[in-house]
Image (cartoon, helix red, strand yellow):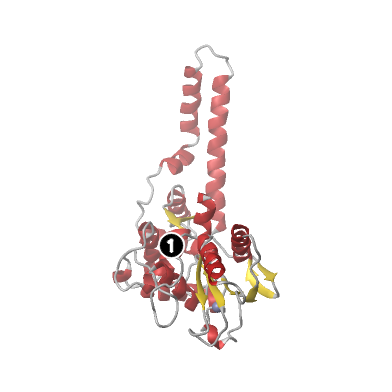
Amino acid sequence: MGTTTQRVSSTRGFALLAVLGGLLVGAAPASAAASAPVLAGLSGLAGGTAVALTVIGAPSGTAPPDVVAAASGDPSTTARSTADVTAAALPAVDMEATVLAAQIDPRRADDTLTPGAKASVLLVEQALRDRNLLDARWVDGYFGTQTISAYAAYQRSLGYSGIAASGLPGTTSLTRLGQDRFAVTRAIGPGSRVQRDGHVVDARTQAMLTEAERLLGFRLVLEQGSYNPGGDSTSAGTHDGGGVVDIDIAGMSATTRTAAARALRRVGFAAWVRDPSQGDWRWHIHAAAINDTDLSSPAQHQTGDYYLGRNGLANHAPDDGPRIPIQTWEEYQRTR
Ligand SMILES: [Zn+2]
């Protein structure tokens, strides 16, 4: 419904021009008695652009979801004006918080909510419910396995498959789900795919690795990248999506290995030193970028487990790495 957005924008633009015009007209007679002409200009505006003022002044979020849903599928003038009023002040869905909840909540043993995510997750769940993809009893602000399944079904309904239909919200699907219902704020995404050490990673992961190297003062060499076509049986699919890398730490001292894991954690990876006793592999650091919207489902589980203090392996053992305050790449960038 791009036309609706454009209509709202142009209506707003006209109102803004009208206000500016009124102020300019009011300001024109110089400083003496300036307030009266300004008021006159504004009252003239109120008469001339009643529709625009109605849109701007409309109360937010008061239209019941079923009315909005009807409006979005109905091209009649009445329906469009309903959509316009709603679009004037849509509630916000914080995408960072929503994606974080979608990684952590399915891994929780209880029904604790992810801090800061409840209002956003509720809006997403209400939209899924109104599309008959989520039972009303799961509309609770908790992005658990039921909500993941519903979101994946929604992504499939848009024609997505594979990691694009993993149930982890991406910018495009979330924005479409929010059409006439909510505005997506703090949008995040993996960026384009780039080469690093002969492996494929996404641009967000590349930037995170570069910053970790800057903190460490030495290069981090990959031995496995992202977007694998499901070929590596030792990785259980964690490298099939974006945001996941293995770093070669052969020859590093225990101190240096730990320092590398700490730097990777600081910039927003769930990162663990893996040793040969844990699996059929050499010494390496396995790192999964928290809030990378291209994470495969197994990698989502690992970032969620990291938040919950586990090691990201099938045995769900306690985290054996350096514990520091957990933050995403975006949070790191805002606080540094
Ligand atoms: Zn790995």
Structural crowding at the residue carrying mark 1, measured as other residues with C-alpha within 10 Å and reported as few (<14), some (14–19) or many (≥20): many
Report helix, strand or loop for mark 1: helix
Q: Is residue 125 above or below residue 225?
A: above
Where is residue 101 shown, x and y percent of the image?
Answer: 41, 65
Front position in the image: 295 or 173: 295
Q: Is residue 320 left or right of residue 229?
A: left
Q: For residue 29, which quarter of the picture?
A: top right
Q: Is residue 186 left or right of residue 125?
A: right
Q: What residue would you read off at disc 1?
A: 98
Front position in the image: 50 or 289: 289
Front position in the image: 157 or 257: 257
Where is residue 174 shown, x and y percent of the image?
Answer: 49, 63
Where is residue 291 shown, x and y percent of the image?
Answer: 50, 65
Q: Is residue 56 above or below residue 91?
A: above
At x 56%, y 20%, the residue is: 27
At x 56%, y 30%, the residue is: 20
